Image: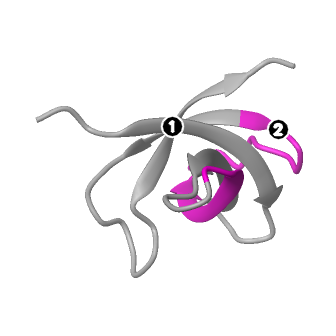
Amino acid sequence: MPSKETSGIVISNKMDKTIIVVVKNPIVHKKYGKIMKQTNKYYVDDPNNTCKIGDKVKIQETRPLSKKKRWKIIKLIQN
């Protein structure tokens, strides 16, 4: 089974070897048909502490690395 991949923006890098990435997905309301933005925060493993706030990153799901950390960085996307 392939692992999930998504991309988002780094909103916090204050922890050691961990960043928080926010992913915004447009969804359609079932009844009204309005397009809304769904926001999810993911704790991502950053072993070299290379990411900064505002960076766009591509992340991939992985085995549990800690209590909340379930994702790892694949690559940094250039703006």
- The residue under the point 81% across, 58% down is 11
In this image, 75 relative to 70: left or right? right
Residue 46 visible in the picture:
no
Q: Is residue 71 above or below residue 8?
A: below
How is the model colour-coded? one colour
Q: For the view shown, which residue lies furthest in the front direction?
A: 32
Range of magenta residues? 33-56
Dot placed on the residue nearer the N-terminal end, 2 or 1: 1
Please name the amino acid that badge 1 sits on.
Thr
Question: For mark 2, does the 10 Å Cα neighbourhood hold few (<14), some (14 to 19), or many (20 or more) residues?
Answer: some
Q: For the view shown, which residue lies furthest in the left direction?
A: 1
Q: Is residue 42 above or below residue 58?
A: below
Tell us which disc is closer to us: 2 or 1.
1
Circle 2 sits in a helix, a strand or a loop, which is it? loop
In this image, 72 relative to 47: left or right? left
Question: For mark 1, does the 10 Å Cα neighbourhood hold few (<14), some (14 to 19), or many (20 or more) residues?
Answer: few
Residue 55 visible in the picture:
yes
Residue 1 at what x, y percent from top left?
Answer: 10, 35
- The residue under the point 67% across, 35% down is 57
In the image, which disc is placed on residue 28?
Answer: none
Near-viewer residue (36 or 79): 36
Residue 78 at what x, y percent from top left?
Answer: 80, 18
CA–CA distance between discs 2 and 1? Answer: 14 Å
Residue behind mark 2: 55
Q: Quadrant of residue 54?
A: top right
Residue 22 at what x, y percent from top left?
Answer: 69, 56
Please name the amino acid that badge 2 sits on.
Asp
Q: Is residue 40 magenta?
A: yes
In the image, which disc is placed on residue 6?
Answer: 1
Q: Quadrant of residue 8?
A: top right
